[in-house]
Image (cartoon, rainbow, N blue to C red):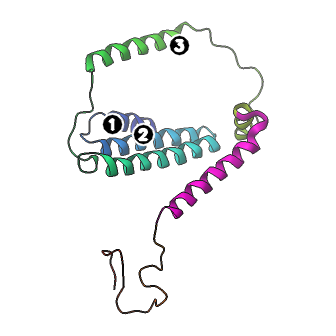
């Protein structure tokens, strides 16, 4: 109940706060609360994947907002509402249609027993025989992201002081930095 309320309230806050950066982190809190609910249902793999994906996605989005938004770091006040009447009409129609569908559908009776390991069952249902390929692809993508970040900097950790790490003063060709 607490996680549901947290997910709902932080989802509402996305449209209440007055900056894109704050809205991003409110959305992250909402997704993390939903992921915790998924974890509580016993789907550990899916819950962890949601947590990892949402943290990475929202942090990357916040970093890009800080880098590229015209206002300082996406923290300037702004309105998150566009076409409020049209959005309210569409939302009301969608909600009414989904609620009618819930009430009108003849729900099937459960047949069989739940799988002994829901994570394996979910993986088989989603990926079939390609689960090993997808796991390898995930590790490869992660290694690519790390390698890209490492290779994107023009300076290494020893560029400031050179070979003489005990120097009294840093000889930093780029300027700035903390130095000694």
Q: Which label's residue is closer to the chain start, 3 or 2?
A: 2
Q: Main secondary structure of the magenta part?
A: helix
**Residue at 70% of width from left, 43% of height from top?**
134
Is 70 magenta? The answer is no
The residue tagged with tag 2: helix, strand or loop? helix
Specify whether 49 is left or right of 34.
Answer: right
Pointers 1 and 3 in contact (C-beta within 8 Å)? no
Frontmost of labels 3 and 2 is 2
- Marked residue nearer the N-terminal end (1 or 3): 1
145 lies above or below 84 = below
Please state, as top left, top right, bottom left or bottom right, where the C terminus lies in the image: bottom left
Residue drawn where x is 60% and y is 37% of the image: 41
Q: Nearer the viewer, residue 159 or 82?
A: 159
Name, please, the residue furthest toward the top. 104
Q: CA distance from mark 3 to mark 2?
A: 24 Å
**Looking at this rendering, what residue extends furthest in the left direction?**
77
- Depth check: 44 or 52 in front? 52
Nearer to me, 28 or 159: 159
Residue 151 appears at what percent x and percent y? 53, 63
Quadrant of the snapshot with the N terminus = top left
Query: Residue 30 shows which numbered tag?
Result: 2
- Give the number of the mark in front: 1 or 2: 1
> Where does label 3 land, which residue?
102
Of circles 1 and 3, the one toward us is 1
Which residue was labeled with disc 1?
14
Q: Are marks 1 and 2 in contact (CB under 8 Å)?
A: yes
| Residue 173 in picture, x, y percent from top left | 36, 78
Mark 3 Cα shell of 10 Å, populated few (<14), some (14-19), many (≥20): few
Left or right, 154 with reference to 77: right
The magenta segment is 127-153
């Amino acid at each position: 109940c607490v996680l549901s309320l947290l997910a709902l309230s932080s989802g509402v806050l996305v449209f209440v706060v007055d900056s894109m950066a704050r809205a991003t982190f409110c959305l992250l809190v909402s997704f993390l609360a939903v992921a915790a609910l998924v974890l509580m249902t016993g789907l550990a793999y899916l819950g962890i994947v949601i947590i990892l994906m949402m943290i990475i996605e929202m942090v990357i989005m916040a970093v890009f907002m800080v880098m590229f938004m015209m206002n300082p770091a996406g923290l300037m006040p702004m309105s998150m509402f566009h076409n409020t009447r049209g959005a309210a009409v569409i939302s009301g129609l969608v909600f009414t249609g989904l609620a009618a569908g819930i009430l009108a559908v003849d729900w099937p009776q459960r047949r069989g027993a739940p799988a002994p390991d829901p994570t394996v069952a979910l993986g088989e249902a989603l990926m079939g025989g390609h689960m090993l390929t997808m796991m390898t692809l995930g590790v490869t993508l992660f290694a690519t992201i790390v390698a890209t970040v490492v290779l994107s900097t023009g300076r290494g950790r020893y560029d400031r002081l050179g070979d003489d790490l005990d120097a009294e003063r840093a000889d930093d060709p780029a300027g700035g930095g903390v130095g000694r």
